[in-house]
Every structure is written in C-alpha cells, then in structure tokens.
Amino acid sequence: MIQRSASDALDELAVQHAVLRELMERCEALADEVDIGMTGPAILVQAVARLRIAFDEHNRFEEALLRPLLAARAEPAAPRMPDLPREVRIARIVDDHVSQHRAMRDSLDLGLTPGPTAALRGVLGSLREHLAGEERTLLAHPLPRDDA
C-alpha cells in the first residue's frame, strides 16, 4: 500500500538518487586524495559509512514501494516472462531487485575497510549503473494518474 501518491513517491526516489550520487562523488574525491597521499583513509571510511547509511535508507523506502508501483503500471511487468501470471512476474522483479540491493550493500561494507581504493571505485560504478537502471525502468515509465 502506498501512503503517498505514486508520483510523489517517484519524485522522492529521484531526490534520493541525487543525494546518493553526491555522496558517491564525495567518496571518489576522497579516494583520489587517499591515492595521492593527501589524506588518510579514515575520512574516506567515514564517507563510505555515510553513503551506506543513505543507501540503506533509500533501499527501505524503495523496497516498500516497489511492488505497489509495479502493480500500478499499465504495461505488464517483466515482458520477458510472458507465460507467468502478472503477480508472479512482479514478485520475481521485486525479489531480484532486493537481491541486487543486498549485494551492493555487502560490497559497500567492504568499502568501509581501509585499503586500496580500486575495489571501492568498482562498487561505486556498480551503484551508479544500478541507479541509472532504476531511472530507465522504474522512474521513466508513466504511472496511471493519481486521481484516476
């Protein structure tokens, strides 16, 4: 059940994506500084922790909305699974998406440990791709009007 209008929820998700991108940019800038010896890794570890907290909050919000948002769409969910009932397709999409979130969260946990920044940069790249994918699929497709 969606407590707010679908369009408000999607707007909030877009804002959260922008915040996550800002936090990722901060992590990358600090990683650059760590790589050249300009700063120690402790500041970077703190920035990654802030990113992880924001990502966890975003995931809780998004995961609570995902099933109702997909169900509200006019087009069928997951056209690559046409032989399955719509509810099953939606459940599979949600389960897959939640699994992606968990994998990225686990990867961000690794970014909390001091060490080479290459692994962290890989995680940030994956997170950027994930957000872009959500924007192409979840945020880009129109929903039925809230007052319909």
Image (tube, helix red, strand yellow):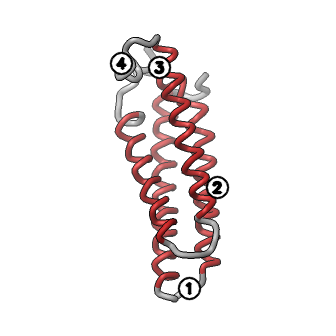
Disc nearer the start of the sequence (2/3): 2
Left or right: 69 as drawn, with respect to 113: left
x, y percentage for residue 88? Answer: 51, 16
Discs 1, 3 touching: Cβ within 8 Å: no
Q: CA distance from mark 3 to mark 4?
A: 12 Å
**Secondary element type, mark 2:** helix
Badge 3 amino acid: Arg
Q: Is residue 128 above or below residue 59?
A: below
Please report the residue visible at 46 percent of the width from the left and 74 percent of the height from the top.
29
Badge 4 amino acid: Glu
Please report the residue visible at 37 percent of the width from the left and 34 percent of the height from the top.
137
* Within-10-Å neighbours for mark 1: few <14, some 14–19, many 20+: some
Q: Mark 4 sits on what residue?
A: 75
Badge 1 amino acid: Thr
Q: Is residue 18 above or below residue 94?
A: below
Q: CA distance from mark 2 to mark 1?
A: 23 Å
Q: CA distance from mark 4 to mark 2?
A: 33 Å
**Secondary element type, mark 3:** helix
